[in-house]
Image (tube, helix red, strand yellow):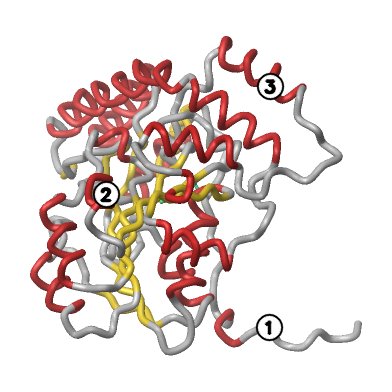
Amino acid sequence: MNKVRASAPQLEGLVPYDPKYLPAEAYLSANENPRDVDAEVRAAIARRIAQVPLNRYPDPLANRLRDLIAEANGLDRANVLLGNGGDELLFDVALAWGGPGRSFLNLPPTFSVYAANARLTNTRCVDVPRRADFSIDEAAVLERVGKGDIDFVIVTSPNNPTGQRASTAFIEELLDATDALVLVDEAYFEFSRATVRPLLATHENLAILRTFSKAFSLAGARLGYVLANAPVIEELCKVRQPYSVDAVSQAIGEVVFENRARFEPGIREIIEERGRVMEALRTLPGVTAYPSDSNWILFSMEDAGAAWQYLYDRGVLVRDFSSAPMLEGCLRATIGTPEQNDAFIRGLRDFLSESR
Ligand code: PMP
């Protein structure tokens, strides 16, 4: 076999992102919506897709969907950019604001894709770790950006995997303290009912990331978007893949967004179930559950790895962070349907009584 030469040095030792996709009856591992798009919306999607020309390239900017999103947010088309999931847009931000000689401020523990993107783009990753209760060390973040060498910051609100949202007052202080791009990742904002969108009117250095993957049950269609002032969108357009959002996904996104009110009852159910699961977890001895503004609960316990296996053997897949840095002993359970949540709580209770 003729050998291939080594790939780029920043890839050395890098482990590909692994969502740990394993089959399970109760799939509570990836923070998806447990309920698929309903039958009527599905039928409307089928009708719309039937009209999509497949021999032509899609509209590169997905302008129809852009207009729908802009209008719903009191913005213009120039303030919205669609991507192939939020993931693509996160990479675009790292390409546009990162690079050799540039610095990204990260608030770990948080979504691991940010640090991976920094590494892929040869961007220096500066960490301001969260406190032991996973709250943001606001003073330390403000002090760090005050040095003036940070090019972009990502604040996840609510933060994955820890669960809590950032305060709007803090985001405003941060925006005022720096001219770095501040990306507020609101992938789960529908479950916290909180957004920093009004700050776009006064801060050119703000960008907001959203996704169709969670509240809108569309993880399979890969649609995310950024809201920002036009100069930020223009920079992102310089690095984006021209046709990353395919015509079929655009059509699906349009129908789902037009029908977004129909997803409200499902969102309300998840928020109610979150309260119920939290109460149940708090009655379990040796389990510490962290407050959540999102559609999952992070909790820590002894023997978390064994608990993960026990749950999985009973058809309940949760996310194992027990050996991740800063998350030792932690598991994360997505809020599912009431039946799935019952199976999760029952499984954990049984594990605890059997291991006593
Ligand atoms: N941001 C956060 C915090 C996430 O958890 C995720 C999904 N895991 C994303 C962005 C990206 O989601 P998607 O690519 O499905 O839009």
Residue 287 can be seen, yes or no: no
Residue at image position (52%, 25%) is: 256
Q: Earlier in the sequence, mark 1 or mark 3?
A: 1
Question: Disc 1 residue type?
Answer: Ser
Residue 85, position as x, y percentages in the image: 54, 47
Q: Is mark 2 within 8 Å of ligand 1?
A: no
Where's the N terminus, which quadrant? bottom right
Nearer-the-camera pick, 55 or 346: 55
Q: Secondary structure at mark 3?
A: helix
Q: Earlier in the sequence, mark 2 or mark 3?
A: 3
How far apart marks 2 and 3 lie (CA) works out to 33 Å
Question: Disc 2 residue type?
Answer: Ser
Circle 2 packing at 10 Å, graded few (<14), some (14-19), many (20+), is many
Query: Mark 2 or 3, which is nearer the eye?
Result: 3
Which label number is shown at residue 236? none
Residue 270, position as x, y percentages in the image: 31, 25
Circle 1 sits on which residue? 7
Task: Identify whether 42 is placed above or below 107.
Answer: above
Where's the C terminus, which quadrant? top left
Task: Identify whether 12 is placed above or below 352.
Answer: below
Q: Secondary structure at mark 2?
A: loop
Which label number is shown at residue 48? 3
Residue 96, position as x, y percentages in the image: 49, 71
